[in-house]
Image (cartoon, rainbow, N blue to C red):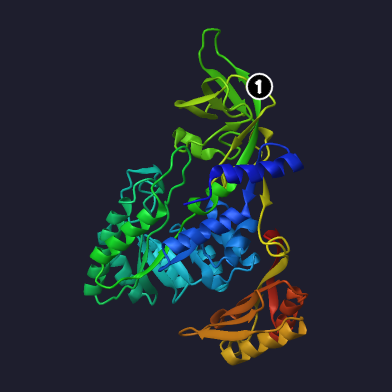
Amino acid sequence: MTEGFSQVLERCRAFLEERQPPTPCLVVDLDVVRGNCERLRRALPEARMYYAVKANPAPEVVRVLRQAGAGFDVAGREEIELCLAQGVRPDSLSYGNPVKKARDIEFAHRVGVRRFTFDSLEDLEKLAEFAPGSTVSCRILVDSPGSQTPFGRKFGCSAEMAVDLLARAAELGLDPEGVAFHVGSQHGDPRAWEAGIAAAGEVTRAVAERGVSLRGLNIGGGFPVGYLSEPPPLTEYAAVVRDAVGRHFAVVPELSFEPGRAVVASAGVIRSEVVLVSRKSAADEKRWVYLDIGRYGGLAETENEAIAYRLVTAHDGGPDGPVVVAGPTCDGDDVLYQRTPYRLPLALRAGDYVDIPDAGAYTQSYSSVSFNGFPPLRSYFVGGEAGGVGEFAGRHVLAEFSGVAAELLDDPVFLCESLERVLDKAGATVCELTYKQFEPHGVTAMALLSESHASIHTYPERGSAFVDVFTCGHKADPELAVQLLRDLLGASVSRVTTIHRGQEDS
């Protein structure tokens, strides 16, 4: 499914030898990220792919996946802002976290996100109030005994409850798209998707009997990576999905999936340094090998030894012996592998490097901020299209207006013309103008630019509007566009946020 770890390791090691960055650090090969994305999409070409941003939220990763045509599964406001700042269109975002604050739902809706997942009546009612008219899917509980990092019962509801919730979604004026499920991360058994698809088919039929027609199915993520052993090929997972959909759905639904680990894990190599090699007694057969990275520095998935990473050293091939592998902090739980039988070279000494392949997912995003004074895991990037990924530089301005006349905020033609006028004066050329009018009031007007966008979402009853202007690859001035639009509407500005490549200055 992915490029061989030795090839990725060789390229990342070449970078490390040339640059000599301080350890621990993560090196990500963006060409491998793109290749994994393309392989996943070839395996399931009928499905819309939404990359799970939480797996690795680096702006560089988001940009290369945007260029590859992926959508993005986001968990909250920060990930939405990150994606928008990298030029992702809001209609390519799916807000998949079923645990959401009302203000985050409202923010997402304001900037143009229209796709949400829920699993409770409370969240559904918040969506109806703060994201009216949006497309929603209900996440159901699925048992996943083969997952190395299962979700347990934290997310999802029973199939019976899902039927009631989806019918209620239609009554609340939302657009119930379908059913979502997730079998758990790093799942080694392709047959696990069968149960979720079967349950989703039952829900779809039951909801149809209530007069609501569903059209979608989100099969989540969970596609595994070969850490110490190779998983079944991705084609086998795709075959199970197609077969199950064909048997459990009268009409093939619009499929979507949310891979994260399968996109970025094999693209990353962590370099760590041995801090200490010791024994607990003279007779102890096992050595303790302490690295400068542990559970708090990026290897959180070693909790309960769930994910067993490959460890590579310059001494491999020589005599070895059993070890316990631990992190550097003062926490007694910062032990990576004690039960799992790891062996490392007897020649290994303090100061030697230990490289950890397949570490591009759930490492940097899990690293803590300064626990025991240790800094978060540093990231570096290699690969990417020449003149493409590396040259990206954009500005993203988000503004909230208040005190605007209601009749202006409910006039889509005026709003589209206003957007075009201010963008022209700010140095941007509009390629396309679109709008959507909501009942009873409110308009979203959007202007598409070259690799950029601008939009205004209005709340006439409150006299307020939310403006979003992103520019990339040209000299247009998004701050000027926002100022001109403010003057044109006679608005007061409640808040302005400017983001440069994902770093926010409010």
**Label 1's element?**
loop
* Residue 120 screen position, x and y as percent: 36, 60
Q: Is residue 174 left or right of residue 60?
A: left
* Quadrant of the image containing the C terminus: bottom right
Direction bottom: furthest residue:
413
Residue at (70, 74) in percent of width and height: 493
Residue at (48, 65) in percent of width and height: 94
> Looking at the image, which is closer to me, 314 or 246?
314
Total labels: the figure holds 1
Q: Is residue 203 above or below residue 327?
A: below
Q: Quadrant of residue 394?
A: bottom right
* Residue 321 screen position, x and y as percent: 52, 19
Residue at (64, 77) in percent of width and height: 454
Q: Is residue 46 left or right of residue 246?
A: right
Q: Looking at the image, can residue 109 be seen?
A: no
Q: Is residue 428 left or right of residue 338?
A: right
Q: Looking at the image, can residue 437 be seen?
A: yes
Direction top: furthest residue:
282
Mark 1 residue crowding within 10 angstroms, few (<14) / some (14–19) / many (20+): some
* Residue 281 screen position, x and y as percent: 55, 9
Q: Which residue is mark 1?
A: 349
* Residue 460 screen position, x and y as percent: 56, 83
Badge 1 amino acid = Arg
